[in-house]
């Protein structure tokens, strides 16, 4: 009876954390049409440069020591790693403040977003909040404190989207987007750090233990810091180069398309990843197999994501102006191009921790170099055409190749038999084919409202068919 109990506990953890993430992201979804109607594409383009820079710098904020927290051998070592991460974050944010003061204006000029210059000074504060959140986030994963993780997701979604929408209504411009993002990060970090389970960690300052933890887990900054920043650069580099080649407005359209497509991954994947990582790390420490856990999760995610991205591929060009406002038609066209890449990335993200669990850090670093080279080559090739649309086609093609290869790597690391998983994935994809044809036809004859109704009805039918199939295969 141990296996069913463990399975039930895993599903309860998934439901709890996914529910909290869904509540937080629901606010973001509801606020998006308000935000896009009160901010210009150039405002969103400037914010995309700010948020991308923060995300890239956060990869080296604490040198990836935070990723060692779930796999630390004992609780004392995990607590020492938390302290180490907080010290590194404080030092890095201080150095960044000096760099922004000295070279901030030149940075904004280089990426053609001069409107960002007056509030680039908020970047060190954003990095500090993000770094603190990462440390307590991974500690909560270790302790399986999924209730606090879920609540922090709600806090971040409400604070960020609410303030951004309010400041946009007041005509705040790009500063409203930056301020909302910072508020969400700070409040979510405070909520997660307030958890009573951290009392033992912050009760004293273990300087000797901190130094020992830095030496014991030195392989994480050695291999994971470089891999993380290269991986994020591969994903985020379009947000820095699109404004350089095509202007801030084009960057705004790309950012909205990308952000909207990645919302389902934030909705579900970001909630599932910590639960999966915590469960996989515990099972690996106990010598248990990970193949059934990983393959089952992959197929459940495929069933959830396929209808969403099928609709985007077939009808986003018509649906974006309906949802976000008439000025965002170009973003809808870009979303159609990005849909296949985003689907595979969304399936890869929740199980990417398998390489961490298996301690295959060198492999991760080597593959990330290939990923960055592929995406950079796609951007260089695309921008020569002078068309943002063709550039995004190249980005999506390279990203699809990289994401598909990543899925195979992660499943292989879990010792999953790929043939039956691929066959089941093919059946789920076939169930979505009529949905794509329905939305494609509606987009040509029924207008935006008719396309939306066709998408909703078709997704309901596909969901029913997918659930029946998953139950028959004993996956649900």
Image (cartoon, rainbow, N blue to C red):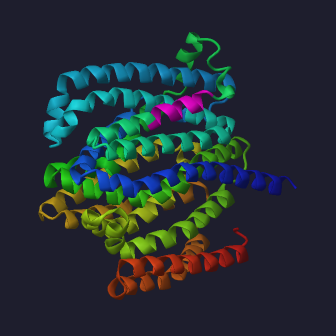
- Please state the horizontal and vertical placement of residue 441, each as a whole percent of the image: 38, 87
Nearer to the camera, 195 or 453: 453
Nearer to the camera, 350 or 284: 350
155 displayed left or right of 247? right
**Toward which corner of the image does residue 196 lie, by quadrant?**
top right
333 displayed left or right of 164? left
- Please state the horizontal and vertical placement of residue 327, each as a whole percent of the image: 25, 63
Magenta span includes 403 = no
137 displayed left or right of 54? right
Residue 74 visible (yes or no): no
State whether the magenta stretch is mostly helix, strand or loop: helix
- Please state the horizontal and vertical placement of residue 322, each as a whole percent of the image: 35, 69
Magenta span includes 186 = yes
| Rendered view: 192 above or below 431 | above
Highlighted range, magenta = 184-194
Q: How many marks?
A: 0
| Rendered view: 453 above or below 109 | below
| Rendered view: 179 above or below 28 | above
**Toward which corner of the image does residue 475 lie, by quadrant?**
bottom right
**Toward which corner of the image does residue 112 lie, by quadrant?**
top left
- Please state the horizontal and vertical placement of residue 32, each as a whole percent of the image: 40, 55
- Could you tell me which residue is drawn at 28 percent across and 57 percent down? 254
- Could you tell me which residue is drawn at 66 percent across and 42 percent down? 146
Pick out the residue farthest to the right.
1
């Amino acid at each position: 009876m141990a296996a069913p109990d463990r399975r039930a506990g895993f599903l309860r953890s998934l439901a709890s954390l996914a529910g909290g993430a869904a509540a937080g992201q629901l606010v973001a979804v509801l606020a998006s049409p308000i935000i896009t109607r009160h901010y210009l594409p150039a405002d969103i383009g400037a914010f995309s440069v700010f948020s991308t820079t923060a995300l890239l710098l956060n990869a080296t904020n604490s040198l990836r020591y935070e990723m060692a927290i779930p796999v630390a051998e004992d609780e004392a070592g995990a607590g020492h790693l938390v302290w180490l991460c907080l010290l590194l974050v404080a030092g890095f944010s201080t150095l960044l403040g000096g760099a922004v003061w000295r070279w901030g204006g030149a940075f904004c000029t280089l990426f053609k977003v001069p409107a960002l210059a007056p509030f680039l000074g908020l970047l060190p504060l954003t990095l500090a909040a993000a770094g603190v959140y990462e440390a307590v986030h991974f500690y909560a994963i270790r302790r399986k404190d999924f209730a606090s993780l879920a609540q922090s997701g709600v806090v971040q979604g409400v604070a960020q989207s609410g303030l951004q929408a309010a400041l946009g209504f007041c005509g705040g411009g790009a500063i409203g987007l930056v301020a909302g993002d910072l508020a969400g990060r700070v409040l979510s970090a405070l909520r997660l750090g307030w958890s009573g389970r951290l009392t033992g960690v912050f009760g004293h300052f273990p300087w000797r233990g901190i130094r020992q933890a830095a030496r014991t887990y030195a392989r994480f900054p050695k291999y994971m810091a470089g891999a993380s920043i290269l991986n994020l650069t591969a994903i985020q580099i379009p947000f820095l180069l699109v404004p350089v080649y095509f202007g801030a407005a084009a960057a705004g359209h790309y950012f909205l398309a990308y952000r909207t497509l990645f919302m389902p991954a934030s909705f579900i994947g970001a909630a599932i990843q910590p639960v999966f990582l915590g469960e996989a790390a515990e099972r690996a420490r106990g010598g248990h197999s990970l193949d059934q856990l990983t393959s089952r999760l992959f197929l459940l995610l495929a069933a959830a994501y396929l209808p969403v991205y099928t609709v985007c591929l077939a009808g986003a060009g018509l649906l974006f102006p309906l949802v976000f406002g008439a000025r965002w038609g170009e973003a809808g066209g870009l979303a159609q191009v990005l849909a296949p890449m985003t689907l595979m990335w969304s399936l890869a993200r929740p199980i990417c921790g398998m390489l961490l669990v298996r301690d295959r850090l060198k492999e991760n670093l080597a593959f990330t170099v290939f990923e960055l080279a592929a995406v950079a080559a796609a951007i260089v090739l695309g921008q020569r055409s002078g068309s943002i649309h063709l550039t995004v086609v190249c980005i999506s093609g390279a990203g699809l190749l990289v994401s598909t290869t990543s899925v195979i790597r992660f499943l292989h690391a879990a010792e999953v038999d790929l043939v039956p998983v691929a066959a089941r994935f093919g059946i789920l994809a076939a169930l979505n084919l009529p949905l794509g044809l329905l939305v494609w036809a509606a987009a040509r004859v029924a207008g935006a409202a008719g396309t939306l109704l066709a998408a909703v009805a078709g997704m309901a039918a596909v969901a029913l068919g997918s659930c029946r199939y998953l139950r028959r295969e004993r996956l649900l």
